[in-house]
Amino acid sequence: MKRVLLFLLLILPVTTLYAQSTTSLHRMVSGVVYDADSGEALHNVAVAVLGTNIGTVTNADGFFTLKVTADELQQGLKLTHVGYANKLLSAAEIVQHDGALRIRMKQLSLMMHEVTIYGGTARELVEAAIRSIETNYAPNESLFEAFHRETVQKRRSYIAVSEAVMDVYKTGYENRTTWRDKVRLRRGRRLVNHQASDTLAVKISGGPSLTLYMDLVKNGDELLNEKELDKYKFTLQAPVILDNRPQYVIAIEPQVETSYALFYGRIFIDQARLSFTRIELDLDLSDRIKATNAMLQRRPAGLRFRPLGLSFLVTYRHQDGCHYLNYVRSSFRFRCEWKRRLFAAPYTAVSESVMVDREEHPEIIRNRDIFRKSQIFYDEVDAYADPDYWRDFNIIEPTESLEHAVERLRRHNNKE
């Protein structure tokens, strides 16, 4: 993965926050998910409506919301998380708590009789999973309704938020390319805390298109191919449970010198299906110049850029005998040091997309509607602004700190 994302360090304009509304056609189901023993909130828990394509993930506070119809509510909910037993909630349980749930998930210990022993090396296990992609993943076109969010923090304060509902068109996995996959924005909003003393922020190049690029199972040009695998060392770790199924866990680390920064990470593979279910990656920061080249495209004069971290999370959801892309998240951390300024400012930029619904055998997205890799999401989202932004759509709920930041930014922008 030679160049994963590009950053542009630019001046941000003042924008408007659009109001939110709901519709009576849907019922709001919300909840907080905890570890049953420690009481700790669990983030990135997959929450799905049983028997449907509808789902979301919990935020950093363990909180989620879903907008569902009465018929969908009757199906109940299924919650899955790495290392935890699946949690099923019936419609009666949801109604009993008036749609406001406190859910506790129990960690599972993997017993030895549950473990499938693989006779090859960790590298050979990854190669076997690659050979199984065509049978494990969707063979036909799909159109996902997805929610995309990008946030920028300076120190602990949010200074920019941009969000959109979008369509993601994906061809079948028998051909491991993404050149025919497309993204189309539908509705969105953005807001920013603009101060004369704080005009530096981050724009992520091709933000929504990251959903296509980081589908590593489908993108055969990155990581999961023989040429890239040769650059890594593979180690089989202790297995875990995901979706009540034992998973191989394979750690990867660089084993050769290249002209670009490589990754450390973990690859999760379903033991019975030999399917990739989760991929976690962290950029190797040992060579600061290589790390900077992977993260930064250009910068203003007088700025020193110091990379602090780049990580990715990609997860897949199994339904109707196939795996589908579920969630993609990237997190950039870096420090900006200006000449003749006493203090350096740390920044964190996060981009995340969750597939919330899916349509089979859809019409292809027209070229004139495509969101292109060369576009900057933060610059484009205003063209899709809609006062009914929230309405029927399922989203990733903001964390408490982001929710408060949005309210402060809304008040600030209303004064402008």
Image (tube, rainbow, N blue to C red):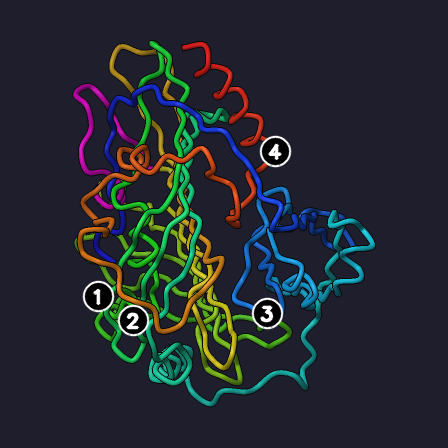
Depth check: give the residue in front, 186 or 64.
186
- What's the residue type where badge 1 is placed? Arg
Residue ID for mark 1: 180
Give the labeled residue for mark 3. 242
- Residue type highlighted by circle 2: Thr
In what element is the residue under mark 4?
helix
Q: In the rendered image, which quarter contains the C terminus?
A: top left
Would you place residue 110 above or below residue 212 in this image? below
Percent x, y of residue 275:
45, 78
Q: Mark 1 packing: few (<14 Cα in 10 Å), some, or many (20+)?
A: few
Q: In terms of sequence position, does the residue under pointer 4 or pointer 2 come before the other?
A: 2
Of label 2 and label 3, which has the lower sequence position? 2
Q: Where is residue 252 in the image (x, y as percent from the top left)?
A: 39, 65
In the rendered structure, which disc, 3 or 1, sits on the residue that comes first in sequence? 1
The answer to whether residue 247 is magenta is no
Q: Name the residue under label 2.
A: 171
Instruction: Describe the element under mark 2 as helix, strand or loop.
Output: loop
| Labels 3 & 4 near each other (Cβ < 8 A) | no
Which mark is in front, 2 or 3? Answer: 2
Q: Label 4 is placed on what type of residue?
A: Glu
